[in-house]
Amino acid sequence: MAVKAVVLAAGSGTRMKSQVPKVLHDIAGKPMVEWVLDALSSLEPAETVVVIPENADAVVGALPDHVTVAVQHEQLGTGHATQVGIDAANLEPGDSVVVMPADTPLLTAETLGDLVNLHQRTGSSATCLTACVSDPTGYGRVVRNGWDKVVRIVEHKDATAKERDIDEVNGGVYAFDAELLATALKAINQDNVQGEYYLPDVFSILVEEGHSISAHKTVEDELAGVNSQDQLASVAAVVRARLNRQWMQAGVWMQDPSAVYIDASVRLEAGARLLPGVHLEGDTQVAARAEIGPDVYILDSEVGEGARIWYSVIRQASIGAEAEVGPYVSLRPGAELRDGSKAGTFVEMKNTVVREGAKVPHLAYIGDADIGENANVGAGTITANYDGFEKHRTIVGKGAKIGSNTVLVAPVEIGERAFTGAGSVLSEDVSDGALGIERSQQKEIPGYADRRRERHERKKAD
């Protein structure tokens, strides 16, 4: 008996008021629909059909190759969308069909598995996912008979006052017998407030034909849909809390989990320490004993064991073991801090290697450079790497000392153990062990301050 799936992703999402299709809105680094497909994949469905609206190329581009795409050309309701989906599927007698919306990213693989297991164990014609909620407004209500059997599902707009008092709601996630679903879909109509074909109407049709219906109850959170930006934020907060809880259970320390934001793609080792205001995104890896935060943004970067990063922005960079970054550092793509190195207060780097033990402690721009082992770059140093047409590279040798407020005009190489004089603008190489200095001769004008004040006072008097 094969399990096949239809994911309904054709909603217009007008309440989102966004140029981005609703199902592509980001939650912890993944589009909403990907969370749904990931949960569904645990069932190992033989086929998955995703129903999309017309002109949804962006949605198609975000879907994995193994899914089948079906286009709903007219928005005529969930029943019609399901019909479009099963028409595109290769259904066979005995198949179970899971139908679910693409905007329920909190639904877990475990709950989906329980739903399908109940459906197949009981031999029901249909099984729906339900929950008892504190505020059922807007949800379809699950109507049971005196024997606690589900007899129908009624949409909120079509429900009577008594039915609206029911707190058990329909989650929009179902498992069906494929043949019975196909037959029942042909019998539903548009006789309702919205003039649409409602998928839940098949339940009353199946009951009238004498078929059994099952329901699996889950918790309220898992049924949360996303139809607006505030709902997106609420759902994203739940996802982040789940991810953070999993990482803490795996040995990651967080001072305040509610103030830590981790994408699903991020990898952390046990013993990593995260302080408030940390954002870890994309292909980021953090090793054991690394301490990050407060207030750090890291994207597509690697952080080594025991590194320390605070009040900084890191993008496509690599930070070695025991390295120190911050405060107020910007590491741009291609920055590589080797073990035990440092980028300190108000330092910006790009496409630069800072080798083992080297330090750029404060107030510097280092671009397109190679800083040798144990070298020290003084405050105010700039690598002038761009000539208006091309970028050029600066090399600072092992153990070199770059004086404060030095401008290194690339291409230029400062030798091993060399020094540069503070305030120098160097455009020529400096040999190993030498001092490179470039300054005009200092001149002193005695009495200047008094004469300047006298000129100012005469001017005022005139």
Image: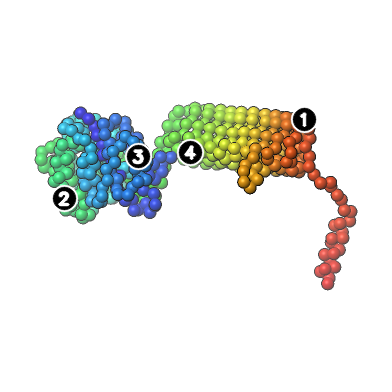
Tell me what residue is drawn at x 73 percent, y 41 percent: 427
Measure the alpha-carbon separation of dots 2 and 3: 31 Å
Measure the alpha-carbon separation of dots 3 and 4: 21 Å
- The amino acid type, in three-letter code, at marker 4 is Glu
Looking at the image, is mark 1 or mark 4 earlier in the sequence? 4
Measure the alpha-carbon separation of dots 2 and 4: 47 Å
Measuring from the top left, give residue 101's x and y in whole percent.
29, 42
Residue 24 in sight in this render: yes
Measure the alpha-carbon separation of dots 1 and 3: 59 Å
| In the image, farthest residue toward the right | 446
Tell me what residue is drawn at x 18 percent, y 36 percent: 178
Tell me what residue is drawn at x 39 percent, y 42 percent: 31
Q: Secondary structure at mark 1?
A: loop
Kindly check if marks 1 and 3 are in contact, taking CB atoms under 8 A apart as contact.
no
Measuring from the top left, give residue 376's x and y in whole percent.
70, 34
- The amino acid type, in three-letter code, at marker 2 is Asn
Q: Secondary structure at mark 2?
A: loop
- The amino acid type, in three-letter code, at marker 3 is Leu
The residue under label 3 is: 63
Tell me what residue is drawn at x 27 percent, y 45 percent: 71
Looking at the image, is mark 3 or mark 4 earlier in the sequence? 3
